[in-house]
Image (spheres, rainbow, N blue to C red):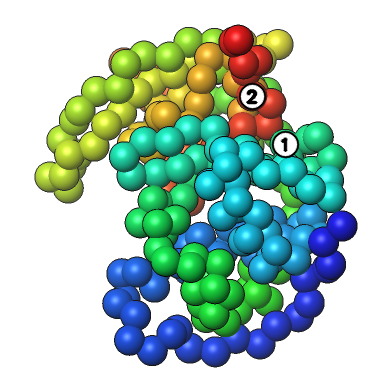
């Protein structure tokens, strides 16, 4: 099993790296650090495992399994398992994965993140049932199953930019609700996936409640749909 993540002190970014690229590395490393802290993995070995999963479609060793679930022009989405149980899912930009000697560069750049900031876990918040959701609720956590999806639609946002949106339907034993997904979130989920929404909020669309994720929220797969062979 991977060694526990040690307390690290961190230095500045690698000299000469463009700011945009540095931010891409930082965002990826935040996710890696959080997974490593929570599940007792060495973050450097976790990085190397991700590289192997990208090259070989899957990686499995010492209780950790990483599967390349989805690949498109810009992103590769990975599923992470520990002892057979899904612990996380997140996408990585191909721009990062295609970098020469990714593992070495990430090992260096990991010094740019203060893990102490991300090691502090927020208190666990209670999950709501869909039947309990009401307009105006914030900080909503929900576990449910995707039961219907709609084709993604290109829209112009209030900021004047183009984005894709899709309203999927999620359900639990208490009811159903529409869930609004944007851009990369859309291709992450499939019908019959069991998902967890964290820090969402309930809005209104066409007079009906709608669950939204927002910039501070997140969606993850906790039990993927069975693979059709």
Q: Looking at the rendering, which quadrant does residue 107 occupy?
A: bottom right
**Residue depicted at x 45% and y 84%:** 13
Q: Residue 6, position in %: x, y?
A: 78, 77
Label 1 to label 2: alpha-carbon separation: 9 Å
Q: Quadrant of residue 204?
A: top left
Residue placed most toward the observer, 40 or 198: 40
Image point 84% across, 50% down: which residue? Answer: 62
Q: Residue at x 23, y 37 (%)?
A: 163
Q: Is residue 92 visible?
A: yes
Q: Is residue 171 visible?
A: no
Q: Quadrant of the C terminus?
A: top right
Mark 2 element type: loop
Q: Is residue 48 above or below residue 117?
A: above
What SS does tag 1 mark?
A: strand
For label 2, count other residues whose C-alpha is less than 10 Å away and answer few (under 14), some (14-19) or many (20+).
Answer: some
In the displayed orientation, state which residue is furthest to the left: 160
Vertical order, 9 against 194 (above or below): below
Residue 167 percent across, percent down from the top left? 38, 20
Q: In the figure, 119 relative to 9: above or below? A: above
Q: Which is nearer the eye, 149 or 26? A: 26
Name the quarter where the N terminus is drawn: bottom right
Please give the residue where the numbered disc 1 appears in the rendered image.
86
**Residue 162 percent coordinates (x, y):** 17, 39
Q: Is residue 170 above or below residue 100?
A: above
Mark 1 Cα within 10 Å, few/some/many (few <14, many 20+)?
some
Residue nearest the observer in this picture, 173 or 204: 173
Mark 1–mark 2 CB contact (< 8 Å): yes
Instruction: Answer with mark 1 or mark 2, whichever residue precedes in sequence.
Output: 1
| Residue 222 image offset from top left, x and y in percent | 68, 31
Residue 109 badge: none
Residue receiving disc 2 = 224
């Amino acid at each position: 099993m991977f060694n526990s993540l040690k307390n690290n002190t961190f230095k500045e970014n690698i000299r000469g790296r463009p700011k945009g690229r540095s931010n891409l590395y930082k965002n990826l490393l935040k996710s890696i650090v959080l997974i490593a802290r929570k599940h007792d993995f060495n973050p450097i070995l976790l990085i190397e495992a991700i590289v192997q999963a990208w090259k070989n479609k899957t990686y499995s060793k010492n209780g950790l399994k990483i599967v390349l679930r989805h690949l498109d022009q810009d992103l590769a989405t990975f599923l992470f398992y520990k002892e057979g149980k899904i612990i996380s899912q997140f996408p990585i930009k191909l721009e990062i994965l295609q970098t020469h000697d990714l593992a070495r560069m990430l090992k260096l750049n990991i010094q740019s993140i203060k893990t102490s900031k991300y090691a502090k876990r927020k208190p666990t918040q209670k999950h709501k049932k869909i039947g309990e959701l009401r307009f105006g609720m914030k900080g909503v956590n929900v576990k449910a199953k995707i039961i219907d999806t709609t084709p993604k639609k290109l829209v112009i946002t209030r900021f004047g930019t183009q984005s894709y949106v899709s309203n999927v339907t999620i359900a639990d034993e208490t009811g159903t609700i529409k869930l609004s997904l944007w851009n990369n979130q859309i291709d992450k989920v499939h019908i019959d996936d069991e998902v967890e929404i964290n820090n969402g909020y309930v809005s209104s669309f066409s007079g009906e409640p709608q669950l939204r994720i927002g910039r501070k929220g997140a969606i993850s797969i906790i039990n993927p749909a069975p693979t059709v062979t």
